[in-house]
Amino acid sequence: MLHYICYRVILLGFGVTG
């Protein structure tokens, strides 16, 4: 579960930064 959350956070980070 924690790995999934971290993965989503990374994806959101890349999405925001472009």
Image (cartoon, rainbow, N blue to C red):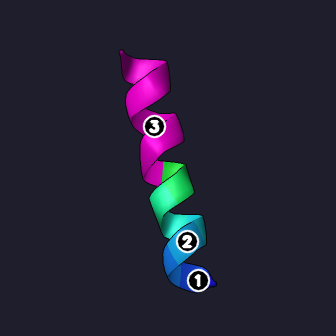
Cα distance, mark 3 to mark 2? Answer: 14 Å
Task: Give the residue type that dot 2 points to.
Answer: Tyr
Cα distance, mark 2 to mark 1? Answer: 5 Å
- Crowd band around label 1 with a 10 angstrom C-alpha radius: few (<14), some (14–19), many (20+): few
- Crowd band around label 3 with a 10 angstrom C-alpha radius: few (<14), some (14–19), many (20+): few
As drawn, 7 above or below 2 = above
17 vs 5, nearest the viewer: 5
Local secondary structure at mark 1:
helix
Q: Which mark is residue 13?
A: 3
Which part of the image, by quadrant, shows the C terminus?
Answer: top left
Q: Position of residue 3 (x, y in %)?
A: 49, 79
Cα distance, mark 1 to mark 3? Answer: 16 Å
Q: Earlier in the sequence, mark 1 or mark 3?
A: 1
Q: Quadrant of residue 5?
A: bottom right
Residue carrying label 1: 2
Residue at x 53%, y 38% (from the top left corner): 12
Outermost residue, bottom direction?
1
